[in-house]
């Protein structure tokens, strides 16, 4: 029985040994697999891997394919064969003319790509020609030079990592720590200079924000330095892959932190600027714009995280677009109000505190939010008007008037003598001239007609104070001055009435008022009014 089991095991081994991997250059997937498979430690056959390069001697071709693998390993670029095309007629639709080519890592290693030559796929002539430059860019010369001085003990391994790699990583982190403190001070100085070029506004908040902004920028520069130097330590592909993913995540976090602080700096400058402007709509825009920019930064940061975790950027953008479209369709009113909000802040049809008439709503603008605008009416009622509606209807902004026009008609009794009518008109003109809140160069006071029960005196003037409350107080003073003058002049205001004239009625005297039209008295009264 044991003999039969041994023969079965031997036959199985022979069958598997016959299923060897052959050189296959029929499509991009097969060429990349051939290149990498024959450079693995358990299937090392560099002369077969060199078949993926055409036009070179075998020794030179081996050197090229080894360098390409070292570049990919050094950058932690692990090939996902499920995404490498198996179509022999594959065309790269990204490049102009849709050539027969395939770029392994378009973003991280665009210089390494395959192209079809005849019926087979090889590494491109440009890749072969530039492989030394790509290798030097990945592994700096001084790193290769210093490696010659590593003693033999440095090549002893601990947990699969050589001792000199541990030392190199510690030295890299130590140099980065020193550079961080130097760069942070330099960047803070440069940011202060840049801020001074664009704005002369400065305060403690802006200074603190610039100091916070310098820190993540310095860390970003250090991450780029570490990313450049890390391949020189020559970790294995698996370790480099994890390290570079970690670096990408850290860099993304730092970029988000940079933009969040940049938003804070910009909003601090804008808040200071808005506080100096006359209108209050800019002040209301500060928190809205701040929240919007923060949301934008976090949204793009989330998209970046998804791409780092392996999702296709096109799929992420398409998903975000479809999700945004679905959200927009599900909340059309909210989107319309949001657009209306932006239109209000762009057009600025009114400011906070302005007295407006918007349809049936009349009142003072108190707040402008993401969705609606709050208007308080004269009776203290509060109206919430959707911004989409407010951006479409006619808005009469009385707060933007240069002056507040006031027009009224005063009615004098029909039996008022012409002398007193003329004196009354001239007296009102003097009152307008003496009033502290009226325009002195634009007013009209005239006897304009005969009403049903009175002689009509038209009064048209303009108040220079724009606030509604001040306007009413100005009217109050103006009206009292007219009443006092009318009383001193001896004229009465008319009201709807009927007069019955009975001729030759015995023992009945006339009801006509006795008006004093003495010219000297009227003249003295007018002189006293001007004082």
Image: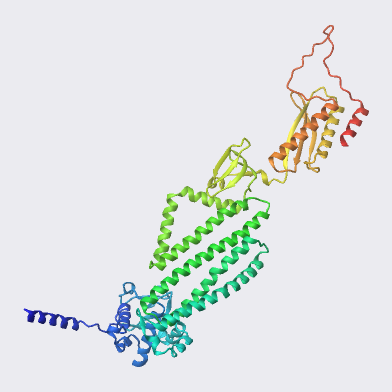
Who is closer to the viewer here, 28 or 262? 262
Quadrant of the snapshot with the N terminus: bottom left
**Which scheme is used to colour this image of the protein?**
rainbow
Write the residue at 13% across / 82% down: 10
- Report the residue that reaches farthest toward the left: 1
Q: Quadrant of residue 467?
A: top right
- Report the residue that reaches farthest toward the top: 506
Q: Is residue 15 left or right of residue 40?
A: left
Q: Position of residue 423 (x, y in %)?
A: 86, 31
Who is closer to the viewer here, 359 or 52? 52
Write the residue at 77% across / 35% down: 477
377 w.r.t. 34: above or below = above
* Number of marks present in the image shown: 0
Q: Position of residue 395 (x, y in %)?
A: 61, 44
Q: Is residue 190 left or right of residue 260?
A: right
Q: Is residue 243 left or right of residue 213?
A: left
């Amino acid at each position: 029985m044991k003999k039969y089991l041994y023969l079965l095991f031997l036959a199985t081994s022979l069958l598997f040994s016959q299923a060897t991997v052959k050189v296959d250059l029929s499509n991009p997937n097969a060429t990349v697999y051939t290149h990498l498979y024959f450079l693995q430690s358990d299937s090392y056959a560099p002369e077969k891997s060199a078949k993926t390069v055409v036009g070179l001697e075998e020794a030179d071709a081996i050197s090229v394919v080894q360098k390409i693998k070292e570049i990919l390993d050094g950058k932690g670029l692990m090939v996902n064969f499920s995404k490498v095309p198996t179509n022999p007629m594959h065309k790269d639709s990204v490049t102009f003319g849709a050539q027969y080519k395939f770029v392994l890592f378009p973003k991280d290693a665009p210089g390494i790509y395959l192209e079809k030559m005849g019926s087979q796929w090889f590494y491109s002539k440009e890749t072969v020609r530039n492989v030394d430059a790509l290798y030097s860019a990945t592994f700096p010369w001084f790193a290769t030079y210093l490696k010659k001085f590593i003693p033999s003990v440095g090549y002893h391994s601990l947990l699969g990592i050589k001792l000199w790699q541990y030392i190199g990583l510690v030295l890299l982190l130590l140099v980065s720590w020193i550079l961080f403190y130097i760069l942070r001070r330099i960047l803070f100085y440069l940011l202060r200079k840049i801020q001074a070029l664009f704005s002369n506004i400065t305060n403690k908040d802006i200074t603190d924000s610039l100091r916070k902004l310098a820190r993540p920028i310095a860390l970003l520069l250090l991450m780029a330095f570490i990313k450049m130097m890390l391949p020189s330590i020559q970790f294995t592909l698996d370790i480099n892959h994890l390290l570079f993913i970690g670096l990408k995540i850290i860099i993304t976090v730092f970029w988000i932190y940079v933009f969040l602080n940049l938003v804070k700096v910009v909003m601090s400058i804008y808040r200071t600027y808005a506080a100096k402007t006359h209108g209050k709509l800019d002040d209301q825009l500060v928190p809205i714009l701040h929240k919007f920019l923060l949301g934008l930064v976090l949204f793009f940061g989330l998209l970046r995280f998804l791409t780092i975790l392996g999702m296709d950027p096109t799929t992420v953008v398409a998903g975000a677009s479809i999700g945004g479209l679905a959200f927009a369709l599900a909340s059309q009113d909210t989107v319309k109000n949001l657009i209306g909000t932006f239109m209000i802040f762009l057009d600025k049809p009114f400011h906070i505190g302005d007295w407006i008439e918007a349809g049936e709503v009349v009142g003072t603008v108190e707040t402008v939010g993401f969705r609606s605008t709050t208007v308080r009416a004269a009776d203290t009622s509060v109206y919430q008007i959707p911004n989409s509606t407010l951006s479409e209807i006619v808005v009469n902004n009385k707060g933007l008037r240069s002056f507040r026009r006031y027009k009224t008609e005063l009615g004098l009794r029909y039996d008022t003598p012409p002398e007193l009518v003329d004196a009354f008109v001239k007296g009102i003109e003097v009152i307008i001239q003496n009033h502290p809140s009226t325009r002195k160069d634009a007013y009209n006071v005239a006897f304009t007609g005969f009403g049903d029960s009175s002689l009509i005196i038209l009064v048209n003037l303009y108040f220079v104070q724009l606030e509604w409350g001040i306007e009413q107080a100005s009217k109050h003073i103006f009206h009292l001055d007219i009443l006092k003058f009318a009383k001193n002049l001896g004229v009465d205001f008319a009201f709807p009435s009927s007069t019955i004239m009975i001729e030759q009625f015995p023992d009945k005297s006339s009801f006509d008022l006795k008006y004093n039209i003495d010219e000297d008295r009227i003249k003295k009264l007018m002189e006293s009014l001007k004082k």
